[in-house]
Image: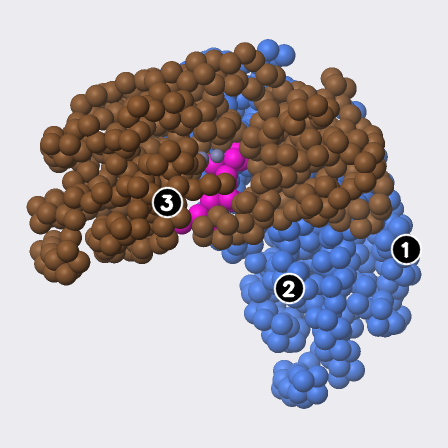
Chain colours: A brown, B blue
Amino acid sequence: MQRAILAFSLFSASALASPFSPQTIEIAEQLQLQAMASDAAYQIVADLTTEIGPRLPGTVNDARAVAWAKARFEQMGFDKVYLEPVEVPHWERGGIAAKVTSPFPQPLLITALGNSVSTPPDGITAEIVRFANLAELEAAAAKSLDGKLAFIDHKMERSRDGRGYGPVVTARSKGASIAASKGAVGLMLRSVGTDSHRFAHTGVMRYAAGIAQVPAVTLSAPDADQLTRMLQRDPHVEVTLNVKNQAFPPKTSYNVIGEISGSSKADEIVLIGAHLDSWDEGTGALDDGAGVGIVVAAAKQIIDANLTPERTIRVVLFAAEEIGLVGAKAYRDAHQAELSNHYIAAEADFGAGPIYKIHSRVGEHALADFDAMAKQLESLGVKRGNNNSWGGPDMSVLPPLGVPVAGLALDGTDYFDYHHTPDDTLDKVPPAAIQQSSAVYTVFTWLMANSESNFRPIPIPTK
Amino acid sequence: MQRAILAFSLFSASALASPFSPQTIEIAEQLQLQAMASDAAYQIVADLTTEIGPRLPGTVNDARAVAWAKARFEQMGFDKVYLEPVEVPHWERGGIAAKVTSPFPQPLLITALGNSVSTPPDGITAEIVRFANLAELEAAAAKSLDGKLAFIDHKMERSRDGRGYGPVVTARSKGASIAASKGAVGLMLRSVGTDSHRFAHTGVMRYAAGIAQVPAVTLSAPDADQLTRMLQRDPHVEVTLNVKNQAFPPKTSYNVIGEISGSSKADEIVLIGAHLDSWDEGTGALDDGAGVGIVVAAAKQIIDANLTPERTIRVVLFAAEEIGLVGAKAYRDAHQAELSNHYIAAEADFGAGPIYKIHSRVGEHALADFDAMAKQLESLGVKRGNNNSWGGPDMSVLPPLGVPVAGLALDGTDYFDYHHTPDDTLDKVPPAAIQQSSAVYTVFTWLMANSESNFRPIPIPTK
Ligand SMILES: [Zn+2]
Ligand SMILES: [Zn+2]
Ligand SMILES: [Zn+2]
Ligand SMILES: [Zn+2]
């Protein structure tokens, strides 16, 4: 089996004028076999989610996660392990309750969006007004929501690549201020998610300057459907909402960094990452424990094989992704002088996988070289994608500064069933999927650390 | 299509020396077509779960459900509609919280079992001791749990007929007192359920006389797995539990009864039923809104077809099934003098279906007649079952008093994914399944109301 794969790839590599030496390819294939026989990625997620659990930025558990990751990195045998401070916002969820008071009294299952203010202690009671989507709310007349609760009932579509997220998530981030600008006393949003379970999906929201800050909550899909059925029976549906959240002064958290030092090109960096923080209601298994497991286990395969790459391999576990890429921006700023030495960067933050495609953002002149790398991943079931990648949420701060990125596309068909809910727990991580994903990262990382390609300059994205 | 079915059944009926007249069969087949073209059962569940929602015995919503059902029956055109009072226990859930305090601090998702007492206001903090099942707990030495929380981690097996429920549910009903008898300060039970979502399954529990009453809660499956993983890493896991429930004086609720009066055998009763109450966290869609929809829509088909059965068809929506068959026992006692006139009884209380088998408890001499009835259901996909039926939870009080029963077996493969959780909502009711189930009840009810069989005496069950 090993020999057959080797023979095939040597042939295809030479046919493509490979940017990889035969020895690099041979090691990549040995690493692939090693990774596909390893449960390291799954075990890392199991340990992180069990021993730490939820890890919202600024909380005690966030600090525990940083200490856990640093200790893990040291124990794994990285050449360098260090922390870089990140000032993170600190918001915590308190109690929450909602009920329909009229005409069909019953409780509702909701959760607060991150950053949401509280209601007054006795809650607010108001009639709801339904909007099919954010555009409908935006089209509402000024003052038309005076004293009302805006209810946005936009269903997210399921897809492998998560394309259903974009069209609905703006209502989460901006809906409360838009509602308030029409006079609403609060926002009730159908969860940004694809499940039909009684879980409300949280996520970060922002208040626009100069507009009243009103509580912003999400409903589980069954609860949103329930409200819609009620409105079909009676246009006057009244809800009581009680939300108690707390904003604290910022705290210092950390990006946790581990390096495998390079040899001949030690100053060039192959950057792989994931985010260490998570929302507070689940244990952050798919988001982004899985990403942590995938990239950390990829480095572990290389360390365990006693290999020295030509370039330095740097694993970064970012702080506070969930509340605005805070750790990523801190990394970008702290490493500004060094960004021109970032050879390529990639982040795993879309569940456990498997990885089915590899996108890129590299110079047009280097596409053949990237294709050759992608070819090497074919035996793992990975196809070549497009050249429009942003590298993942945290890495997305880098391409505007010229850093080449790769997008290893994780199969996210079920991702938004669990995303930002209490149900994001270890049992949702398929061991075989995360094993494949980590194997892909292992091979990718090794090839990138030893490639003779030059991916710069890249097409600089604008958005 | 209609003609083909008719021709076939006339043939098979005559071959079996049918207890049904050709006219009875012909009407049954017309009713079957009518029911299979109707969404009445689904609409009834939609209305009940939307307009009432949860309906725990003794609560405001329980009373609203009774009024709703009575009005619905009257609007449907039953010949008689009446309420029979039932004194029901009244317990309500308050706030609940649990967390691991050491060595891996994080919240746990739990719910209280019905009847559970509260903790002291500040909660209880104690080490947990894991038992694989109730037998292991029973085998624990006296005082061995002094000051500890007993954690029973028994997994329920999935099956179509719910056979996995029996082996685990005793731990729910009796576990707290058994734990307390060994000194435990509380019971934490892995949910009696087959899902792996972050829902804790509630259900009724009882305290044994003369033993300290300790709080009894269930954990979602992912939380139970999490505790087990923690114990594998550290045998000393400490949990804080805070439970606030309230017991109130009993209230009067009602069995809601609707009748289609019989003609020549009006004093004989074909009894079909379901229970109207539900647990408080979901909207009681599968348990037992679906049963309500199935049996009420079955009667509706007969009423809408302007048919008069020979026997009286009585639909009973029982009160307070969830907390101990309270309405069923009240029915049994109130109708004692009339029970010898109960021709046959059947209850739908296992989700939306489809119905795949029909069991019975009839006299041995009448098995061929019952088989002939079952034969008539074959075109709906129903097979003949055994003669050991209890008729369903509420109906189970009747066979010991000689009443023949039928068991129309609903496919419960997914039932315990949702059973007694917040997730038991309308979206879990498959419209096609409940349509078939209600069609089966329609045909069954019509045939039983016009059969020439005599099912008595039955083999009296003992248990
Ligand atoms: Zn993420
Ligand atoms: Zn996220
Ligand atoms: Zn039930
Ligand atoms: Zn039940």
Rendered position, B440 above or below A379: below
Residue A280, position as x, y percentages in the image: 51, 26
Asked whether A124 falls inside the magenta stretch, the response is no
Alpha-carbon span between mark 3 and mark 2:
53 Å
Task: Judge whether B420 appears above or below B122 on screen.
Answer: below
Please state which amino acid type lies under the numbered disc 1: Glu
Q: Amino acid at mark 2?
A: Ala
**Residue positioned 78% across, 42% down in the render:** A140
- Distance, label 2 to label 1, CA atoms, is 27 Å
* Circle 2 or circle 1, nearest the eye: 2
Q: Secondary structure under badge 1?
A: helix
Nearer-the-camera pick, A63 or A223? A63
Q: Residue B74 — which label?
A: 1
Have a look at marks 3 and 2 and say if they share a chain: no
Secondary element at tag 3: loop
Disc 2 within 8 angstroms of ligand 3 (CB) = no
Residue B432, numbered circle: 2
The kind of residue on which mark 3 rests is Pro
In the image, is residue A18 above or below residue A270?
A: below
Q: Chain of mark 1?
A: B
* Numbered range of the magenta stretch: A406-424
Pinpoint residue B326: horizontal percent, then vertical percent: 73, 39
Identify the residue at image location x=58%, y=27%: A114
